[in-house]
Image (cartoon, rainbow, N blue to C red):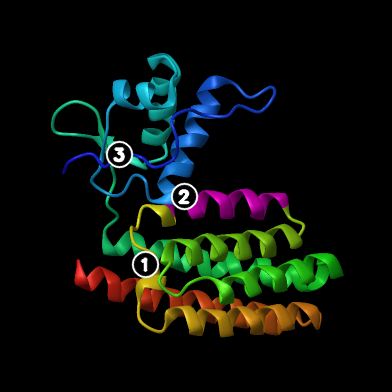
Amino acid sequence: MATRPARTGGSISRSAGVALGEAVFRSLCEALQAGSYRAGDRLREEEVAQRLKVSRTPVREALGRLAARGFVEPAAGRGLIVRNLDISEVLELYAMREIMEGAAARLAAEHASTTEIDALRDIEQAFVEAPQTDAAEMARLNRAFHEAVCRAARNRYLDNASRELQDWIALLGPTTFTVSGRPSTSHSEHQAIIEAIAARDGDKAEKLARAHIREALRCRLKLLQKQ
């Protein structure tokens, strides 16, 4: 499959104290999440280095980390390709996501501040106002919503695990918001989760969050059937 040019800009930004290899790794993970690289796309060391305007050494380090995590695998020729998850991996991924999102919603019901709950409502309002034809923007706001719930859970280990899970979700390709009717049902599910968190009802928040992920899986399977 031909390499799709990444749409994430021409260079990387480094925060103070962040090693170059780490910055390249983060940039590649963000490119996966943004859909700039998708399953089957080839990653060549020299091309990534040119795009990010860095030497090949930190790129080699970053690609090695992606390979170690199982995000990429050796290509038939030179370089690596982004992995394509099989159906059993997809089911396992969503099973774990259901558990983690449920736990995050329960903990958020216990710990979220009023400001954090208001922020969830603001994100959801932005989701409603996003153009229905812009699935990528809805997907971005959806990630922001789930990340905000996880932060409100006040559990750094859950937060770290959720971030890694999102990297795996990025390998699945097109967002489920391309499925007819999914944006509206997702909005209703998000609203119910927010209200359960605001009511400090951990049981209900967890139940709703888990049902939300099961519905996301149903839509994901629909997409996979079309591939």
Magenta span contains residue 47: no
Instruction: Look at the picture and state if 130 lies above or below 66.
Output: below
Instruction: Find numbered disc 3 in the image and state the secondary structure of the residue it sits on.
Output: loop
The stretch in magenta equals 156-168
Q: Quadrant of residue 113?
A: bottom right
Q: Residues within 10 Å of mark 3 (few under 14, many from 20)?
A: few
- Mark 3 is on which residue type? Pro
- Of circles 2 and 1, the one toward us is 2
Magenta span contains residue 167: yes
Percent of width and height locating residue 20: 54, 20
Would you say the residues marked 2 and 1 are in contact, meaning their CB atoms lie under 8 Å apart? no
Judging by the rendered image, the residue that carries numbered circle 3 is: 5
- Report the side of 142 relative to 206 (left or right): left
Q: Looking at the image, tell me whether mark 1 or mark 3 is earlier in sequence order.
A: 3
Which of the numbered marks, if any, corresponds to residue 91? 1
Cα separation, mark 2 vs mark 1, equals 16 Å
Residue 145 in view here: yes
Would you say the residues marked 3 and 2 are in contact, meaning their CB atoms lie under 8 Å apart? no
- Of circles 1 and 3, the one toward us is 3
Instruction: Look at the picture and state if 123 lies above or below 75.
Output: below
Q: Quadrant of residue 227?
A: bottom left
- Report the side of 29 relative to 110 (left or right): left
Q: Looking at the image, tell me whether mark 2 or mark 1 is earlier in sequence order.
A: 1
- Mark 2 is on which residue type? Asp
Foreground: 75 or 12?
A: 12
Percent of width and height locating residue 44: 27, 27
Q: What's the residue at 81%, 83% (across, down)?
A: 199
Q: Main secondary structure of the magenta part?
A: helix
Judging by the rendered image, the residue that carries numbered circle 2 is: 167
- Of circles 3 and 2, the one toward us is 3
Q: Looking at the image, tell me whether mark 3 or mark 2 is earlier in sequence order.
A: 3
Percent of width and height locating residue 141: 56, 63
